[in-house]
Image (spheres, grey):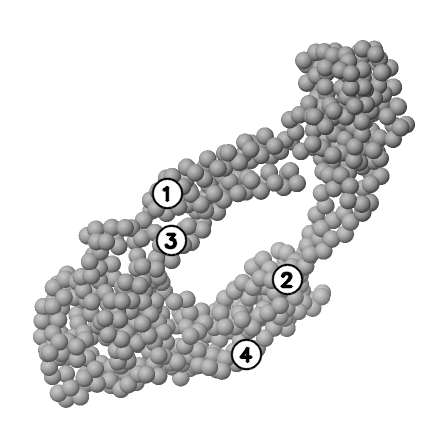
């Protein structure tokens, strides 16, 4: 019976690990419908976009398409965004490569962060580069600058926004190495608890003193001295918060 | 003959010297300075004066008639039983005892606490004692056999005294605060001294070598207000152990408990510190008297895997003690099981904290 319970707990622990690991963002941020990027380029740019979303809570997407299947650029941009993510705070820049037109879809906090001027700058950054890879890279670089600027602008704000409540640091999850460490700590604590319970099986021991036989009210303190000897002040520097930049 | 008085530094233990320049005692090793009045008296070389006087009485003529001594050939224990009770098995080891002869000699007990609880209560207490414990081997629960249950009057020496003592402690106070850049910890060290008097009434010390001292001290305390003057009539139906540890041989144990009581009781008056550590104590005993008393104890012997397990119950209060074997495999399994569970929870919490 205990073996079964043990197996179930281990399975749950491992299962939990994989479930939680899998809960990270898995959808596409760089939608290369026109096949302008190589596999490596796509992967690198996708990683950048994921890191931005993890850090700031804002989904920044870019879509390169040959055509918009008759939907129109704006509708197509919205469709691509909502079809890919549930994040209610985000931006998508659509480049219709066939007609060389652009459209932007923003939602939630991204509306405030990326104003018309910012969007124009980001589009120019993308457009002015000779390669698609370089253009997308520049687009994300500029997007990060705006996100960072907005983050610090909202740092002391009481407003409950994604930027102020979100974790700016990267959230790559807990490293797998912490699983054996956690198990080690758990085993130590478990060992102490169980042995503490088991030690109660021994109830035979010598008495420490005879205070139970003290005559009531018989203790009289006749001499008392509390002498200060010396003091020692230790100073330890506080760990400083590291700035991302 | 001259003697050199050496004062020890409470901080480092080095020998302190009088510094005429500052008119203070100074430790040449750690440079700590002390006012002469602040140094506690060096009591480490004081001779403890401990005198105990007996109140013991002798047996009256014909008082021990009908009481026989039985000896165990296995463990050497000697017990006393009246003619009607008799004895067949040693209450300590369970082996056969043989009648050695008519009871004689030794001091007559001053007091006896009569049995208040019967054999049935002792059996029930054993069941309850075992059933409430965890990780007991299943085979012990199923197969252990109650070999012997005997009510035994165990000889005890009772020590009463007025103790005068002193104790010194090292104490520290810790204060923590922070500013924008640093965390500060200020640890202040103090030398504490207490002296005073405490009186003790009837500290019991087991007077039988066959009865394990730890077993007897574990069933304490007995309520001596219910003790009566000794009468052999109280022994009817029970066994009585003869003392084979004299009062003189028992005194060191009584003194040890008194000394520790002084240390602990005086320590309770040292308040307002974060840590208090005893550095030593001295005591003198005045008006020390001792009495000889018989305490009622139910002894229960069980056998499991060829090993004897002895349990004891205070025959007056019902306090039940006795070590029970532990199933080491079950302990290991439970530790692993609980440890894995706790580990999984810790890891899960780490994930949640990371994701939130």
Name the residue beneath numbered marker 3.
A198
Asked if the residues shown at circle 4 and circle 3 are in contact, with their CB atoms under 8 angstroms apart, the answer is: no
Name the residue beneath numbered marker 1.
A2
Does label 4 lie on the same chain as label 2? no
Q: CA distance from mark 1 to mark 3?
A: 17 Å
Q: CA distance from mark 2 to mark 3?
A: 36 Å
Mark 2 against mark 1, which lies toward the viewer? 1
Closer to the camera, B267 or A199?
Answer: A199
Does label 1 lie on the same chain as label 2? no
Q: CA distance from mark 2 to mark 1?
A: 48 Å
Asked if the residues shown at circle 2 and circle 3 are in contact, with their CB atoms under 8 angstroms apart, the answer is: no
Closer to the camera, B193 or B158?
Answer: B158
Q: CA distance from mark 4 to mark 1?
A: 57 Å
As drawn, B343 above or below A67: below
| Residue B173 numbered mark, or none | 2
| Chain of the residue under label 2 | B
């Amino acid at each position: 019976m205990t073996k079964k319970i043990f197996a179930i707990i281990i399975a749950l622990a491992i299962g939990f690990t994989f479930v939680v690991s899998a809960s990270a963002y898995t959808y596409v941020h760089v939608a290369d419908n026109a096949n302008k990027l190589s596999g490596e380029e796509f992967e690198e740019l996708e990683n950048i976009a994921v890191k931005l979303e993890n850090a700031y809570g804002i989904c920044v997407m870019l879509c390169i398409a040959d055509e918009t299947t008759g939907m129109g650029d704006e509708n197509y941009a919205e469709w691509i965004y909502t079809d890919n993510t549930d994040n209610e705070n985000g931006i998508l820049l659509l480049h219709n490569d066939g007609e060389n037109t652009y459209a932007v879809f923003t939602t939630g906090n991204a509306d405030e962060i990326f104003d018309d001027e910012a969007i124009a700058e980001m589009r120019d950054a993308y457009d002015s580069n000779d390669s698609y890879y370089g253009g997308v890279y520049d687009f994300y670089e500029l997007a990060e600058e705006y996100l960072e600027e907005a983050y610090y602008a909202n740092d002391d704000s009481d407003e409950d926004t994604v930027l102020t409540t979100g974790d700016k640091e990267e959230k790559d999850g807990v490293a797998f190495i912490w699983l054996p460490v956690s198990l080690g700590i758990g085993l130590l604590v478990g060992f102490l608890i169980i042995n503490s319970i088991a030690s109660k099986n021994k109830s035979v021991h010598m008495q420490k003193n005879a205070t139970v036989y003290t005559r009531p009210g018989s203790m009289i303190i006749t001499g008392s001295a509390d002498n200060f000897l010396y003091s020692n002040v230790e100073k330890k520097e506080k760990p400083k918060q590291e700035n991302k930049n | 003959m001259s003697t050199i008085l050496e004062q020890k530094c409470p901080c480092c233990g080095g020998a302190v010297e009088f510094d005429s320049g500052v008119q203070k005692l100074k430790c040449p090793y750690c440079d700590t300075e002390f006012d002469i009045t602040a140094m506690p008296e060096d009591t480490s070389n004081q001779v403890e004066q401990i005198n105990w006087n007996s109140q013991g009485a002798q047996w009256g003529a014909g008082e021990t008639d009908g009481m026989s001594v039985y000896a165990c050939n296995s463990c050497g224990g000697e017990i006393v039983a009246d003619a009607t009770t008799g004895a067949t098995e040693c209450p300590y080891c369970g082996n056969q005892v043989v009648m050695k002869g008519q009871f004689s000699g030794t001091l007559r007990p001053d007091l006896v606490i009569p049995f208040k609880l019967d054999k049935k209560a002792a059996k029930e207490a054993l069941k309850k004692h075992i059933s409430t414990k965890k990780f007991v081997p299943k085979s012990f629960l199923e197969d252990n056999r109650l070999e012997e249950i005997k009510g035994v009057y165990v000889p005890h020496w009772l020590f009463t005294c007025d103790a005068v003592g002193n104790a010194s402690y090292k104490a520290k106070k810790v204060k923590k605060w922070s500013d924008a850049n640093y965390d500060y910890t200020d640890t202040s060290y103090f030398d504490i001294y207490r002296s005073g008097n405490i009186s003790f009434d009837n500290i019991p010390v087991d007077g039988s070598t066959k009865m394990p001292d730890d077993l007897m001290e574990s069933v304490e305390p007995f309520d001596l207000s219910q003790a009566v003057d000794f009468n052999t009539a109280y022994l009817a139906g029970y066994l009585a152990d003869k003392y084979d540890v004299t009062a003189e041989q028992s005194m060191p144990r009584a003194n040890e408990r008194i000394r520790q009581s002084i240390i602990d009781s005086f320590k309770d008056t040292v308040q307002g510190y974060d840590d208090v550590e005893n550095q030593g104590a001295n005591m003198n005993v005045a008006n020390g008297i001792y009495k000889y008393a018989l305490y009622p104890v139910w002894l229960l012997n069980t056998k499991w895997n060829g090993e004897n397990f002895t349990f004891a119950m205070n025959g007056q209060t019902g306090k039940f003690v006795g070590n029970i074997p532990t199933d080491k495999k079950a302990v290991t399994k439970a530790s692993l099981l609980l440890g894995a569970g706790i580990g999984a929870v810790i890891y899960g919490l780490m994930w949640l904290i990371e994701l939130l």
